[in-house]
Image: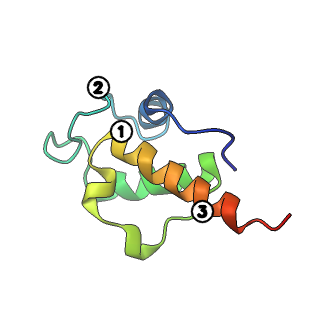
Amino acid sequence: MVYGPVLNDQIIHLLSERVHIEVPSADTDLMESGLLDSLTLVELMSSLEEQFGIHISIDEIEFDNFRSASRIAELVNRHSRQQEMAVPY
């Protein structure tokens, strides 16, 4: 579970530590630069689910959601808000 919004720096750190991709900036295009391919995408998705306690469905596997660290942070934050709204109090 995520507490507070996920920041670009957290995603950049996850990319470095878990997926072994060094990202120059939060807006670097990971696909166009060749840093992210299909194998590392699967590893990234698994790491995001584990680190932030989210589930990424097959329907959300659109390259635009994973194009940059900032887009990945947006995806994680969307999931976090959806999960918070779904939790009964």
Q: What residue type is labelled 2?
A: Ser
**Residue position marked by numbered label 3 in the rendering:** 82
Say if 73 sits above or below 53 in the image: above
Would you name the residue on which mark 1 appears?
A: 69
Q: Residue 37: x and y, percent?
A: 25, 53
Which comes sooner in the sequence, label 3 or label 1? 1
Query: Which amino acid lies under the numbered mark 1 shown in the image of this protein?
Result: Ala
Q: What residue type is labelled 3?
A: Gln
Distance of label 3 from label 1 (alpha carbons): 20 Å
Q: Distance between the residues labelled 2 and 1?
A: 8 Å
**Nearest to N terminus: mark 2 or mark 3:** 2
In the picture, the disc for residue 25 is 2
Q: Are marks 3 and 1 in contact (CB under 8 Å)?
A: no
Q: Which residue lies furthest to the top in this view?
A: 24
What residue lies at 86% left-to-right and 63% top-to-bottom? 89
Asked if residue 49 lies left or right of residue 45, the reply is: right
